[in-house]
Amino acid sequence: MNTTRAGLIRRASAFVADGIISVFLALVPVVGILLATVYFLVRDGLMDGRSPGKRLVNLRVVRADTGQGAAYVDSIKRNAIFALPDLMMIAPALARTAAAPLSVAVLVLEVVFMLTDPDAMRLGDRFARTRVVYLAPSHAGERVA
């Protein structure tokens, strides 16, 4: 199976798919925001570095030093920057008001890092020492599961 650096469109598609899952989790009464935040933190440690969103577009988070799929601790490190705005949603009104602009700022910052880094690593990837790769099918027409 061939691997290459993951492109922005695939990464954005996976992010949106995982975001949809997170939104549905957030709808669970009482503990929804906590469930959504935990999912977003650990999603890249699921299925050997392949969150449900990444599986949809044949991506995998791997450790930069070994090429092995990301573990839960790697996932938490690389996604911690996204958790702060989510956790602010359970705080008093002033913090909730700041959560949405902070989420946007974090997302923009991460995209800028990804677009300007030669290895397309975002800030979370640098911190966790991970990278996202595209899993090209080994044969034409073959889907990587």
Image (cartoon, rainbow, N blue to C red):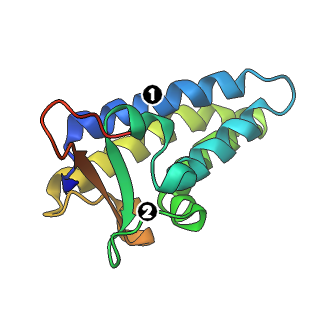
N-terminal of the pair, mark 2 or mark 1, is 1
Residue 25 vertical placement versus 71 (above, below): above
Q: Which residue is mark 2?
A: 69
Query: Callout 1, which amino acid?
Result: Ala
Which image quarter is the N terminus in? bottom left
Could you say which quadrant of the image residue 33 lies in? top right
Cα distance in 3D space between marks 2 and 1: 20 Å
Q: Residue furthest right?
A: 30
Q: Find residue 21 and report its horizontal and vertical position in percent.
A: 58, 27
Q: Find residue 20 and report its horizontal and vertical position in percent.
A: 53, 24
SS category of the residue bearing label 2 = loop
Q: Find residue 104 and report its horizontal and vertical position in percent.
A: 42, 36
Which image quarter is the C terminus in? top left
Q: Is residue 119 left or right of residue 88?
A: left
| Residue at 36 percent of width and 51 percent of height | 60
Q: Residue furthest bottom?
A: 65
Query: Callout 2, which amino acid?
Result: Gly
Q: Which residue is mark 1?
A: 17
